[in-house]
């Protein structure tokens, strides 16, 4: 099979971790007789520096022409404490999500037995955790009308959802629940927000199409609590953009394996795969960042974008092997030998 | 001193836990030669049943006439899965907040050494945690324009903030930080939201008035993570209404002492004090609910509304004694004898 993949390395540690995912993907492709055509393009601060904007049209064209997009991370500290900056790397991210129509961000959270002690939570609380968030990614308050009034003294943001946007996301949620433990939790704030009431009534109306799925409705504040108390009580959670932003990040620390968590952003046409960690500027260029989340994102890509399950399993197996044998970067070394980013990548390729 | 206190017991376990706080308050008042004039009024589902609305005008008048309000909890499950219910208990809560002008919700989170093992988090992560959230309570998306368009197919909610609203809340935050460890964290989503940019620029402009306070700015998703990872790195956190709703609930499970956490909602004129737990309908009428959060809310009331610090300290001391001696309800009994709600209240009164 011929795989056309757009490669967006981005900022900070992005290029280093992407390099390892490329090496591993190429090795898997060779092993299973595929050919990958990588097309690199600019995003984020790197793109601002080069061409003045964080998601240039050329990059968009490259993504549209590809079968899938593999993405590193974007963001640079020089933009962080400057609320008035005209162009920010994050704008590129949001533009990319919107223009590619990446409506569903899929964020699994699961435990790796060998890493369970890294969690801030007690082992007995997290054992068996295997949940997945579906965060709506192209609507809500991220993309509504915003601005100032009264000479800048009043600011506003608008959260908007249409029934079809909710349906499209919820449909993925129900389908995913059918493939898993058949439990779906709709997270909203229906006791206050009109958009949440639309979410809830839309999901309620879809229940009868999936009679096997056990659906629950929980308020976002309650979920923020229960995620820390009993994360293993959840299976699939669906939610709107901003709640998803907060809760998926909260969920990411549960397992103690944040440096390992992959994600997918599904579009109608092209989908994008990226590690959940950020650009981690302090570590950039030092060859110390953990590449495993990006490598596992590549595995998700083989599975989700190309339906190549054996290839994905091969990657996951070699990642598990590296963890078991302690071939890990300093964040996971716990006092034992720490390997470089590139050394971990090389080891994965050799052991595939 | 003569203390006029409005008493809003509310729903579920509200009346039972309020009873104990009244007993303890009366005992403290007697000991220190104060006289409390309690005026009871209806709220929540109880008020809907009696007079058709959750925050009747009579109740509002009673609160306005009082020096402080002591509040139990509201909410009833029969309203929860009915997004179309015309009158909901929560509306009473929101109306009360708005009409009383309760602009700042103060939510401390701290550990009790004897309860630290109840936390889902590891002891070494939470030891020494002593943080306080200031959540803006009368603005933001809770009170903005909302509705439907396109025959109900599109829903919207509006988040609005004025500079003065932010200033009022931030001022309390700076003042509180000055009384504590002089660290203030402004939690926002300034990389996306215009209201957050207004928050950030307003707080930035106030920094020079409090040169001793070390101010940081963090995105809400990052805080959702760090709260679970290193809660003891925070001191005072200020944030807008919806972020505060989510994060204060998340923070409440950190210490393992959720059944003990008090809160205050500060108004320009009258302030309100309440436990952070809800109406817990499953336990209502059984005399098993933990009254300590409500008793500690009464302590906060003595301190904050009346400047009666010795009285507050006396209450906190006897609560600590009850914990040390295991005079606790079933949620904290850990297999030892569990006392009834009213027995804990009686013991506190006797041991004051
Ligand atoms: C950088 C920011 C705009 C972005 C978001 O809020 O969506 C990030 O936090 C994420 O979750 O990918
Ligand atoms: C009941 C609900 C409207 C309320 C809120 O969201 O403010 C509650 O969650 C709280 O935090 O007091």
Image: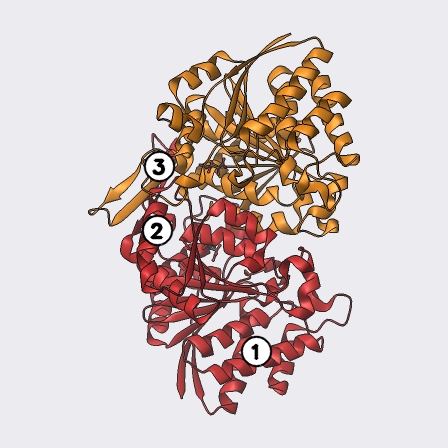
Chain colours: A orange, B red
The answer to which image quadrant residue A162 occupies is top left
Q: Quadrant of the C terminus of chain B?
A: bottom right
Instruction: Report helix, strand or loop for mark 2.
Output: helix
Pointer 2 or 1: first along the chain: 2
- Dot label at residue A206: none
Kindly indicate whether the residue at mark 1 contacts the one at mark 3 (C-beta within 8 angstroms). Answer: no
Residue drawn at x 34%, y 59% as measured from the top left: B207
Give x and y (percent) for residue B183.
46, 62
Instruction: Report helix, strand or loop for mark 1.
Output: helix
Instruction: Report helix, strand or loop for mark 3.
Output: strand
Mark 2–mark 1 Cα distance, whole angstroms, equals 35 Å
Q: Does residue A24 appear anywhere in the picture?
A: yes
Q: What crowding class fits label 2: few (fewer than 14 Cα within 10 Å), some (14-19), or many (20 or more)?
A: many
Closer to viewer: mark 3 or mark 2: 2
Drawn side of residue B294 relative to residue A56, left or right: right
- Dot label at residue B199: 2
Give x and y (percent) for residue B2.
39, 87
Pointer 3 or 2: first along the chain: 3
Q: Which chain carries label 2?
A: B
Residue A175's place in the image compared with B128, above or below, is above
Give x and y (percent) for residue B25.
51, 81
Check disc 1 and report the residue beneath it. Answer: B316
Check disc 3 and report the residue beneath it. Answer: B148
Q: Which chain carries label 3?
A: B
């Amino acid at each position: 099979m011929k795989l056309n993949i757009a490669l967006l390395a981005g900022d900070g540690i992005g290029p280093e971790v992407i390099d390892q995912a490329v090496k591993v993907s190429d090795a898997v492709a060779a092993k299973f007789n595929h050919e990958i055509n990588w097309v690199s393009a600019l995003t984020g601060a790197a793109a601002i520096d080069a061409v003045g904007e964080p998601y240039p049209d050329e990059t968009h064209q490259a993504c549209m022409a590809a079968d899938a997009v593999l993405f590193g991370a974007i963001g640079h500290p020089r933009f962080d404490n400057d609320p008035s900056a005209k162009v920010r790397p994050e704008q590129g991210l949001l533009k990319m999500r919107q223009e590619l129509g990446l409506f569903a961000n899929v964020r699994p959270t699961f435990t790796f037995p060998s890493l369970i002690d890294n969690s801030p939570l007690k082992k007995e609380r997290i054992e068996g955790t295997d949940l997945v968030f579906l965060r709506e990614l192209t609507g809500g308050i991220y993309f509504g009308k915003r601005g100032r009034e009264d000479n800048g003294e009043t600011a506003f943001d608008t959260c908007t959802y249409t029934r079809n946007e909710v349906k499209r996301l919820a449909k993925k949620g129900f389908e995913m629940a059918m493939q898993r433990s058949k439990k779906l939790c709709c997270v909203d704030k229906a006791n206050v927000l009109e958009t949440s009431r639309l979410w809830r009534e839309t999901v309620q109306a879809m229940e009868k199409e999936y009679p096997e799925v056990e659906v629950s409705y929980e308020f976002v504040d309650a979920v923020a609590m229960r995620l820390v108390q009993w994360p293993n009580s959840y299976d699939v959670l669906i939610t709107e953009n901003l709640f998803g932003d907060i809760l998926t990040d909260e969920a990411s620390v549960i397992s103690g394996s944040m440096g390992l968590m992959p994600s997918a952003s599904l579009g109608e046409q092209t989908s994008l795969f990226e590690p959940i960690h950020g650009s981690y500027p302090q570590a950039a260029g030092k060859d110390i960042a953990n590449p495993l989340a990006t490598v596992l994102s590549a595995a998700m890509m083989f599975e989700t974008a190309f339906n190549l399950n054996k290839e994905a399993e091969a990657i996951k197996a070699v990642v598990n092997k590296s963890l078991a044998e302690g071939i890990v970067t300093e964040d996971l070394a716990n006092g034992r030998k720490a390997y470089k980013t590139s050394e971990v990548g090389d080891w994965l390729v050799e052991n595939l």
